[in-house]
Amino acid sequence: MTLRLTTVSVPVKDQQRAKTFYADVLGFSLLAENPMGDGNTWIQMKPPKGRAGITLVTWLDKLQPGGQQGLILETDDIKAAHAKLKGRGLKLKPVVDASWGRFATFNDPDGNGWVLTEIAKKPKKAKKHK
């Protein structure tokens, strides 16, 4: 049996405002935008790299805007990503060095918390010569 995480629900107040933020600021692409009935719309987006994406939800009573925390976006170059996102108007905390790598946090317009990370590269092992 194979299981994959494909989509995480991100609770928002206004789907169109959130869609604009995720597209214009974070560079996510729109995978689907379909009516679901009862005035709800399925909006599914994905970051430029990676397999898992998000859906912008307004219909889950127990998941309120700002209630999703600790979502992680990984980058190969946090300094460049931080500067680029800041240039697009995103308010990020400064980059912090940790034993496992580096990170900076930010919130989407609804207060959902994200962590931008760069995992420390493992040193290459020296080849043994015979």
Image: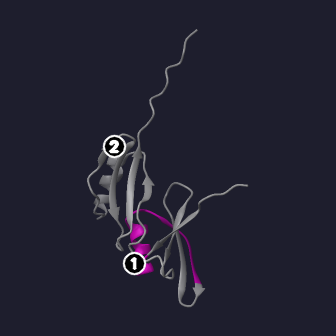
Whole-angstrom CA distance, mark 1 to mark 2, is: 33 Å
In the figure, is residue 79 to the left or right of 71?
left
Taking the view exactly as shown, the residue that stands out farthest to the bottom is 38
The x, y position of residue 120, in whole percent, is 41, 39
Taking the view exactly as shown, the residue that stands out farthest to the top is 130
The x, y position of residue 73, in whole percent, is 44, 56
What segment carries the magenta color?
Answer: 12-35
Q: Quadrant of the N terminus?
A: bottom right
Residue under label 2, please give it: 98
Residue under label 1, please give it: 17
Residue 1 against residue 60 in the figure, above or below: above
Residue 37 position by quadrant: bottom right
Residue 105 position by quadrant: bottom left
- The answer to whether the residue labelled 1 contacts the one labelled 2, judged by CB atoms less than 8 Å apart, is no
What residue is rendered at 39% in x and 67% in y? 24
What residue is rendered at 29% in x and 49% in y? 95
Q: Mark 2: which amino acid?
A: Ala
Query: Is disc 2 placed on a helix, strand or loop?
Result: strand
The x, y position of residue 97, in whole percent, is 31, 43
What residue is rendered at 54% in x and 15% in y? 128
In the figure, is residue 2 to the left or right of 68?
right
